[in-house]
Each structure stands twice: as structure tokens, then as C-alpha cells.
């Protein structure tokens, strides 16, 4: 059992976030197992994104603790969290729109060079990172578009770029906020395969609305409702939980019961 | 850097080398000082996305410190320039450290408020000469050159401008500049990639303040005086206008903007008097409404459209 407990990469205890009397996250105890793809689902306003913001410290928790690899990280700054190996994406695609696709990935790689404050150095010194950046772009199928200005790419490709940029940091734990939101069927399938592929040797925690994606690739599922954990476990178990079905009254309940959608 | 840009630099430099033969050198030096001021400001607004509304305080404080160092302490010219630039850099660090804690309009307001405080200090402090300003600053000599001669001074000012312009260019196209652009483009994402954005913003602010200070110090040398106008918020507004008119986030934009504004002010001052303010206001309105990318920004866009049509 102790081994099992050690296998938790991320653990929150009694996590609470209040906004002027409104409790967005209410005593969440979350355990993310190492190597898993862990999905966080729940109806709108359940507190999923707030949870993400707390875990990456873009928001300060009102109460509770967050542990990463057994260490208390509750009071660290967001950039420290990132350097520890917890790297997040955002609901609205997080790219640097007026830089090239290659530059986007290179900015993530650049920090390791330790020259990011060197304003007297030529940017050509960054060319040493180009090979690695191209490799990462190739892994998401964007190598042909490396020279493109990011803002000119379609939405699906921007999300793929975002994943490549996140991968550049080689994070231990990747937090993806609705990675397939607003995508067409083909893009969804591509991103799903991509997430599955990059999940090797790392842990992924994702907020996702698309039940096909959740059922298809997640190992564990946590259902949030009104800021609290409603259920947790493998997909089949959670989908059969009456509390969950009740929370998902209506069309989404049907979706939850038959993930394949046909 | 592309060949075309390099040629543009060389042509610009060539014109500036010959300029004092055709134009009154004091006017060109004034344009160069304000062009440097605007370029320094553009480093912050155009490449980091920070709108400082108190940048005149760096121009003004450097002008006073250089003036005081040359006139009262009788320091050599070079040390006087360095003292002014150093003072502005230090002040930039203090104001920057306080201002970068806030974003957007709050950042602008903090810089304005702190700049106003320093302005009132200059108004009251005995060494500035208050409303009269600090008059009769000697230019001194540099490497045996007597700077009292306008032409000799001109080439010093041109060298300072070219050096500072190169440094700004280099900063924009450096590993540091990449991070600044990332912060301008998407600050939360830069944080999520592990960058401590406050440190980058602070360094950008300090660099910008120091270079604005260098412009102010040089200006004192040119006019042999430093006055409250340099530190006044009107001047902070003017540098915003120069940058926007020329094209924010473009390399030459601030230079073009400063040239247009300074020349207009110079030409119009005798003819229309205080109407200059109204004309400047009108230019600002037209710029914001009709060509937001500024003169250089719109020209680049036009050029790219033409290229696009040919293909």
C-alpha cells in the first residue's frame, strides 16, 4: 500500500478557493497517479479551470495543500511550479501569435541555455536550438510549417503547436485545459492520438468535455460538481455512478453512458 | 539582418553624416536626442508591451544630473554624460520595481504618479533652478575636441545616437528580446513556460530608462541648459505620440515619429504660436483613427500588400 501512495505524483488535500464569499473549489482531495492520463470532468461552473489555476498557482488557494512528488508546493510562484516540471496549457490556445512556429517552440527551449537575460548577445546564438525545435515540431506534424507566423495557422494546428511547446520543457506532469475544445472530428482524433503518444513516461491531467476523448484515453476520471469531487475512478465505474448520472442530467448523461456515441 | 535593411542603415547613416552641411546642426541634434528617447520608449512599449506614462522623468533627471555635474562639479564631459545616464538608470530601477507589480492601465498610472512626484521634487529642489532651469552648462571637451563648436558636437551626438540605436537593435534581436516578445504576445504563457516575467520586465524598464537618460544627458550638452519641460508629463505624452505616429514596434518608427514632431514644432512655433498644441492633438487623433500602425508600420504593410499582389 505504501508503494501505491508513493506513486502519487500530485496530491491535493482540502483544496479550497473562495472568491468574495463564492466558493469555487470546495475541499478537493485529488490524487493523480504517476504515468496516468487523468481526466477532470464536470458540468460548467464545477470548478475545473479554477482547480487548474490553483494547481499551477495562477491562483492562490484559500486553504488546503498541494503536494508534487511528496513536496509541499502550495506557496510557490507559477514560474517555479513550471520549472519543477508541471507545465500547463490554457483553454484559449496559448501560443505567441506574431512569432513564427519555430520561435514558439524555441522560447520554451531557450530557458535551459541560461542566456535569456543576455540582451547583448545575437539571437543567432539561439539557432543551436533549431534542431531540437524541429524534432518537436515533427512529433506533432508541424515541421513543414516551422517558418509560418503562428497567427496565420488554423486552430487545430495552434493547439498542436501548444502541445509541442509544452513538450519542449519535458514536463513530468502536463496539465491540458480542454485540449480538443472547438475542434472538428479529424483534429480531435489527431490530438487524442497525440496526447496518447506523449503520455509515455509522463503524467497528464486534463480537463475535457468531449466524452469520446475521456473514454478513449483516460486511465482515471475525477468528476467535479459545485466545487467538490463527486466521483473518482476508472471510466466504466464512474459512468455507472448514479450521482454522476444525476449531475449530468440531460443529453450529456446519455453521452456519458455511451461514450462511443453510436 | 537582411541586406535591404543593412543598406537602409548605411544610407541613413550617410545622410546623417552629411546633414549638418545643409541643415542647422542644433535642429538635427535635437531630432537625434528625441529619436533616441523615442527608440528607448519603443523598446518598452513596442517590444515588451508596457506603456510607461512617465518616461520624461528619465530624460529630465539625466538632463539635470548631467547639467549639475558639468556646471557645479565641473566634471569632464564624458563623466557628466555617464552621471546623467547612471542616475536615470538607477531611477528607472526604483520606479520600474514599483510599477511592474501592476499591469495595463495601472502600470501606466503608477509610472505617471511616480514621475509627477519626481517632477515636484525638481520644481522645489534648489539645484535645478526651479522655473528658471539650470542655465549655462558648459559643453567642455572630449578627447581634445572642443565641443563648443556645433559641428564637433554634432558628430559626438551622432556617435552616441548610432551606438545607442545599435544597442536597442541588438536587444530586440537577442535571446532576451525573444523573451520580451513572448511576454508582449502572451504573458500567462511565458509564465507557464517557467519565465519569471517580472525580472524580464524590470530589466527592459531599466534599459529603456537608461537610454532615455542618455538622450536627456546629450540634450543638456546640445542646448547648454536643463529645464522642467524635460521632466514634465507633456514630454511623456509627446514620446507616446512620436512612437505611435512613427510606428510602435517597428525599428525606424520612433525615429521617423520624432523627426516629424520635432521638425513640425520647430517650424510652427514662430508661425502659429500656442496653436502648436492643437495641431499636435489633431495629428494624434488622425494617427489613432486613420493609420494605427504609424507611418513606418503602414508603409511596411503597404509594401507587403504590393509584393503579395505581384505573386
Image: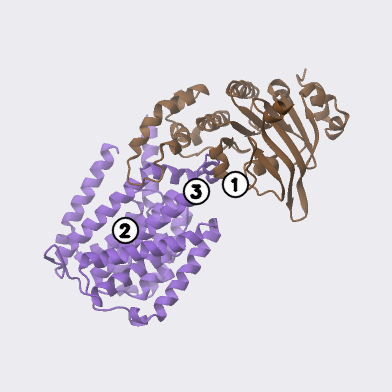
Query: Considering only vertical position in the picture, is A173 above or below B59?
Result: above
In terms of depth relative to the viewer, which is nearer, A138 or B29?
A138
Residue found farthest to the front: A2
Q: Dot 1 surroundings within 10 Å: few (below 14), some, or many (20 or more)? A: few
Q: Which mark is residue B35?
A: 2
- Where is residue A13 drawn, in percent x and y? 74, 41
Callout 1: SS: loop
Q: Quadrant of residue A210?
A: top right
* Contact between labelled residues 3 and 2, with CB atoms less than 8 Å apart: no
Foreground tag (3 vs 1): 1
- Say yes or no: labels 3 and 1 on the same chain: no
N-terminal label among 2 and 3: 2
Q: Is residue B12 left or right of residue A94?
A: left
> Residue at position x 48%, y 26% from top?
A137
- Where is residue B285 drawn, in percent x and y? 46, 60
Which color is chain A depicted in?
A: brown
Which color is chain B depicted in?
A: purple
> Residue at position x 30%, y 50% from top?
B167
Residue B179 visible, this orientation = yes
**What's the CA distance linking mark 2 and mark 3?**
28 Å
Read off the residue under disc 1. A76
Callout 3: SS: helix
Read off the residue under disc 3. B197
**What's the CA distance linking mark 3 and mark 1?**
15 Å
Label 2 resides on the chain identified as B
Query: Considering only vertical position in the picture, is A138 above or below B181?
Result: above
Amino acid at each position: 500500500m505504501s508503494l501505491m501512495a508513493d506513486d502519487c505524483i500530485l496530491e491535493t488535500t482540502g483544496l479550497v478557493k473562495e472568491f468574495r464569499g463564492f466558493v469555487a473549489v470546495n475541499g478537493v482531495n485529488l490524487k493523480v497517479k504517476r504515468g496516468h492520463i487523468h481526466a477532470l470532468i464536470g458540468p460548467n461552473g464545477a470548478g475545473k479551470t479554477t482547480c487548474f489555476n490553483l494547481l499551477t498557482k495562477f491562483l492562490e488557494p484559500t486553504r488546503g495543500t498541494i503536494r508534487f512528488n511528496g513536496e509541499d508546493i502550495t506557496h510557490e510562484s507559477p514560474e517555479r511550479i513550471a520549472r519543477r516540471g508541471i507545465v500547463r496549457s490554457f483553454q484559449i490556445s496559448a501560443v505567441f501569435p506574431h512569432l513564427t512556429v519555430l520561435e514558439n517552440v524555441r522560447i520554451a527551449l531557450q530557458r535551459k541555455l541560461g542566456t535569456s537575460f543576455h540582451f547583448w548577445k545575437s539571437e543567432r546564438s539561439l539557432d543551436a536550438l533549431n534542431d531540437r525545435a524541429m524534432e518537436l515540431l515533427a512529433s506533432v506534424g508541424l515541421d513543414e510549417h516551422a517558418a509560418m507566423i503562428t497567427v496565420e495557422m488554423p486552430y487545430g494546428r495552434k493547439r498542436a503547436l501548444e502541445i509541442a511547446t509544452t513538450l519542449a520543457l519535458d514536463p513530468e506532469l502536463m496539465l491540458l485545459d480542454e485540449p480538443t475544445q472547438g475542434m472538428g472530428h479529424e483534429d480531435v482524433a489527431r490530438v487524442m492520438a497525440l496526447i496518447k503518444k506523449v503520455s509515455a513516461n509522463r503524467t497528464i491531467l486534463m480537463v475535457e468535455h468531449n466524452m469520446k476523448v475521456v473514454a478513449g484515453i483516460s486511465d482515471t476520471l475525477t468528476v467535479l460538481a459545485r466545487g467538490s469531487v463527486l466521483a473518482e475512478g476508472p471510466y466504466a465505474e464512474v459512468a455507472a455512478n448514479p450521482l454522476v448520472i444525476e449531475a449530468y442530467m440531460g443529453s450529456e448523461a446519455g453521452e456519458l453512458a455511451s461514450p462511443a456515441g453510436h | 539582418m537582411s541586406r535591404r535593411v543593412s543598406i537602409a542603415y548605411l544610407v541613413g547613416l550617410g545622410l546623417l553624416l552629411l546633414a549638418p552641411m545643409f541643415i542647422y546642426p542644433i535642429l538635427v541634434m535635437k531630432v537625434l536626442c528625441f529619436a533616441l528617447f523615442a527608440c528607448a520608449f519603443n523598446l518598452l512599449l513596442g517590444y515588451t508591451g508596457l506603456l510607461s506614462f512617465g518616461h520624461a522623468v528619465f530624460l529630465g533627471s539625466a538632463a539635470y544630473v548631467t547639467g549639475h555635474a558639468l556646471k557645479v562639479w565641473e566634471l569632464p564631459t564624458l563623466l557628466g554624460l555617464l552621471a546623467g545616464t547612471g542616475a536615470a538608470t538607477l531611477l528607472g530601477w526604483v520606479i520600474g520595481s514599483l510599477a511592474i507589480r501592476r499591469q495595463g492601465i495601472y502600470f501606466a498610472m503608477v509610472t505617471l504618479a511616480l514621475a509627477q512626484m519626481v517632477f515636484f521634487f525638481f520644481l522645489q529642489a534648489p539645484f535645478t533652478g526651479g522655473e528658471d532651469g539650470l542655465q549655462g552648462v558648459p559643453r567642455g571637451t572630449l578627447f581634445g575636441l572642443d565641443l563648443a563648436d556645433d559641428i564637433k558636437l554634432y558628430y559626438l551626438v551622432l556617435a552616441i545616437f548610432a551606438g545607442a540605436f545599435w544597442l536597442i537593435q541588438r536587444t530586440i534581436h537577442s535571446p532576451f528580446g525573444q523573451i520580451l516578445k513572448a511576454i508582449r504576445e502572451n504573458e500567462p504563457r511565458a509564465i507557464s513556460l517557467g519565465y519569471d516575467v517580472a525580472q524580464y520586465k524590470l530589466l527592459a524598464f531599466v534599459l529603456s530608462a537608461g537610454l532615455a537618460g542618455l538622450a536627456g544627458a546629450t540634450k543638456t550638452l546640445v542646448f547648454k541648459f536643463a529645464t522642467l519641460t524635460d521632466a514634465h508629463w507633456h514630454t511623456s505624452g509627446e514620446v507616446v505620440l512620436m512612437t505611435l505616429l512613427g510606428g510602435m514596434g517597428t525599428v525606424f518608427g520612433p525615429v521617423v515619429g520624432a523627426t516629424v514632431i520635432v521638425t513640425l514644432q520647430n517650424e510652427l512655433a514662430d508661425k502659429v504660436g500656442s496653436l502648436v498644441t492643437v495641431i499636435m492633438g489633431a495629428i494624434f487623433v488622425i494617427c489613432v483613427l486613420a493609420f494605427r500602425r504609424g507611418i513606418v508600420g503602414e508603409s511596411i504593410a503597404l509594401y507587403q500588400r504590393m509584393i503579395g499582389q505581384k505573386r
